[in-house]
Image: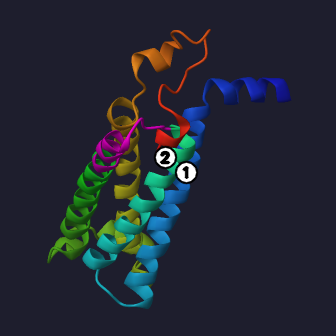
Amino acid sequence: MSIKVKEFYRAHKEVIVYLFFGVLTTLVDLVVYLLFNNLLHLSALPSTIVSQFVAMTFAYVTNKLWVFESKTENFKAFLREMFSFYGCRIAGAVFSVAFAWLLVELPGWEDASWAVVALFGRSFKWYSFLIKGISSVIVIIANYIASKLWIFRKKKAEQSGEGTGGQASDAAKPEDNV
């Protein structure tokens, strides 16, 4: 059994690690949101903005180091990667803020969402928490696609391991990798 688990992990390591850190990033986002929205009594919009910034920073570090194991050859490449990452995450944050505004803050919307309010009630802002959770799932999926296909994409030589006896190599000196 454990051999099959190890084989599965090796075959799907990137997705498994991404999902693991995606869950942690979502938890960071939701906990910060709850703290600001419920304990500090800020509305959904500023709570979402703060929670997205904290989660975005956590996600960049974990994605770079452990998910995609990205090594940039120089500072210019590092900046391109970082700004691409933050740009995509900011687009996701804008989506999250718009989602919260449309489904929580927009006057009259809660009247149209009576079923959700009837199921969860209004205590502890469960309705806004549910909306926050739905937007988080959408953003996680979009972020993986952007990270895999654009931000942390491997160079063709790195993917095929050309010139290294089947092993991917770092063309730059270790001190140049950021």
75 inside magenta stretch: yes
Q: Percent from the top left, x then y, of residue 53?
A: 35, 66
Magenta span covers which residues? 70-83
Q: Is residue 71 above or below residue 122?
A: above
Q: What's under tag 1, amino acid-wise?
A: Phe
Q: Do the numbered discs 2 and 1 sit on residues whose CB atoms are within 8 Å?
A: yes
On the picture, is 20 further left or further right than 133?
A: right
Q: Can residue 123 be seen in this view?
A: no
Mark 1 — residue?
21
Q: Percent from the top left, x then y, of residue 39?
A: 44, 89
Residue at image position (49%, 73%) is 31
Mark 2 — residue?
63
On the picture, is 85 further left or further right than 4?
A: left
Is label 2 or label 1 in front?
2
Residue at image position (32%, 71%) is 48
Instruction: Kindly indicate the quadrant of the structure image that contains residue 114.
Output: bottom left
Q: What's under tag 2, amino acid-wise?
A: Asn
